[in-house]
Amino acid sequence: MRTIRHLLALLILAAPAMSFAQIALGVSIRIAPPAIPVYAQPICPGDGYLWVPGYWAWDDVDGDYYWVPGTWVLAPEVGFLWTPGWWGWRDGGFFWNEGFWGPTVGFYGGIYYGFGYFGHGFYGGRWDHGHFFYNTTVMNVNTTVIRNVYNERVENITNVNRVSYNGGQGGIEARPTPEEEAAAHERHIPPVREQVDHASAARANPQLRAKANGGRPPIAATERPGNFTHSMAPSGEAGAARAAVHPRDLPPIARPEPPNSGDAKADAKYQKQQDKLIAKQEKDREKLEQKQEAEHQKQMNDAERQRMEQTHQQETQRMVQRHAAQMRVLEAQRPQPRAFRPR
């Protein structure tokens, strides 16, 4: 019986995509999936990679949800985009609707997955003359490496709801647009092998179980499918910096609030020092990233590469600690507000 249930759970991952009007296949789950966690997006590893947002999957064997980290995946065909899967409520239970590749982004339950997937449509990029152009407003792209980019502000993204399911008590009340219904009937490609293997690796990782992490997975996103060593912890946690192996894995340098002491001259001097320090720290990151990238090009066996990655992580962490110390020294020099003196 355990084997049969295991095979059924795998079928849920491999089920074909369906329109909103179609019947979802798989097991009916009475427990609602946890909310979508807030996390940072790893930098895009190369041209042609598209972002596949993380999601909660169900393991019927253990009776628990597990987080499948968001990751970058090469599009299976030029011109194809990813439509994320989604949980929907029907007949007293939650059913999983598998995501798919296709020429148009279809309905994904109105779920706010972030990074261009804000409930309807996709704002993270577009195909143009055989190349995918990234919208750097919502995508983390190194523009010195990938030049096919643009910057387009996304309007009306307010009151973000992290609920991860459609319908039912407390669920997203969204219905497909006519364009999304039409997209459901276009030619589709199911999740590629890298995505299936990525989901299987997540299923085997006990840290990603909802019961273990309380809905806050320690590995929320990865640079490439299955590569959980290059992971990003939920945004705002110290784990994101601790997990960084390379400077590109780090969140942007936090810029402190500008001083407002009442002494314009002192404030301007401090602001200039702050800008200078941040520019120097960004240069440090760039220099270390170039050094480590050059080392990645060397021929080496698995053991040597593992030792190299450990060294890279140590180098990155030493830089983080050094930068934090520099910022603390500068912060101690921040102009203090003038004391109020009554006339």
Image (cartoon, grey):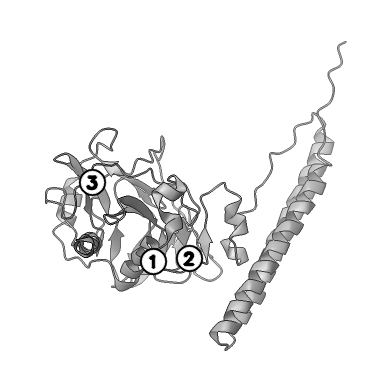
Q: Secondary structure at mark 1?
A: helix
Q: Left of 175 or right of it: where is 125?
A: right
Residue lying farthest left? 22
Compare residues 100 and 106 and report the one nearer the observer.
100
Q: Secondary structure at mark 2?
A: loop
Q: Secondary structure at mark 3?
A: loop
Q: Position of residue 228 (x, y in %)?
A: 48, 65
Q: Left of 207 or right of it: where is 261?
A: right
Q: Which residue is mark 2?
A: 228
Q: Position of residue 207 (x, y in %)?
A: 46, 56
- In contact (CB < 8 Å): disc 2 and disc 1: yes
Q: Earlier in the sequence, mark 2 or mark 3?
A: 3
User: Residue drawn 33% across and 67% down?
Assistant: 195
Q: Which residue is mark 1?
A: 201
Q: Earlier in the sequence, mark 2 or mark 1?
A: 1
Question: Dividing the picture into quarters, in which one does residue 284 lie?
Answer: bottom right
Q: Which residue is mark 3?
A: 29
